[in-house]
Amino acid sequence: MISNTLQFLSQHVFLILPLSIILMVAGFLVFNKKKPFIKFVLLFFPIFGVINLIYSSDWNTNYIIKHGVEGEGVVTSIVPTNNYINHVQVFEYNCTLKTATGKQVSVVFENNEALLYPKDQLNYLPTIGSVFKVKYIPTDEDNFVILTHKSPEQHCLKLMQNIGSANALYQLDKSNLNNKNRLKKELQLFLKAPCDTNVQKGFQLLLDQLK
């Protein structure tokens, strides 16, 4: 019940806010000149709508992290929709989750960064065919978050970002041994990780040039 409520609040923030305002206005019209104290209660509807808009996804995520169990997921298809949020097209991600008991569940989610935990500067959603780690509520499997720190693809993207930062410093001053050693270290970490072998070959060549 709690999971369903938190999931509903986090997924329908743009419905709940205007609905709360409508309920407040309707309440003022109905109870005009009747039971004045109710008007003060009605003011809390839009306040709750605003608070829900800001914090609902965090409430749901924290509940999942505290009460959920880990599983795996894989994206099977990505379908564009006709909807846009902040000028960004909404995509539907169809995927299959495998629970801790081996049960497979078909779920659909949108390109919403609220699903990612913990959030970082990358915030990349999984691609088709990529396997990722999740945490879900056992009685409500479609209420889940993607564990970015445990998903291989997310980890590889983070390593690539570190390589990019280290390489930028090295290119700025190639005579600086600290910059060179940092780049070598980041390249070695990527080569040891279970990342794309084609990308690893390119980074191996770069590492060889630094020796």
Image (cartoon, helix red, strand yellow):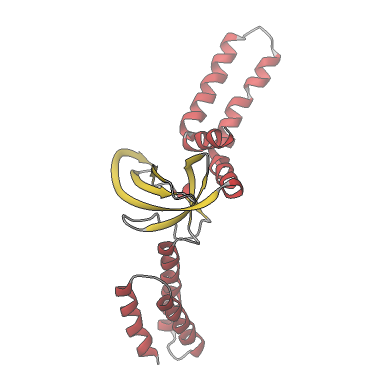
Q: Is residue 83 above or below residue 193?
A: above
Displayed quadrant of residue 40: top right
Q: Residue at x 40, y 54 (%)?
A: 125
Horizontal and vertical percent position of residue 170: 43, 83
Residue at the extreme front: 101
Q: Residue at x 37, y 53 (%)?
A: 74
Residue at the extreme top: 33
Quadrant that contains the C terminus: bottom left
Q: Is residue 78 above or below residue 12?
A: below
Q: Residue at x 55, y 41 (%)?
A: 54
Q: Is residue 36 above or below residue 70?
A: above
Q: Nearer the viewer, residue 24 or 122?
A: 122
Quadrant that contains the N terminus: top right
Horizontal and vertical percent position of residue 148: 48, 58
Horizontal and vertical percent position of residue 71: 48, 53
Number of numbered labels in the structure image: 0
Q: Nearer the viewer, residue 94 or 123?
A: 94
Horizontal and vertical percent position of residue 135: 51, 50
Q: Nearer the viewer, residue 204 or 181?
A: 204
Left or right side of 36 for 101:
left
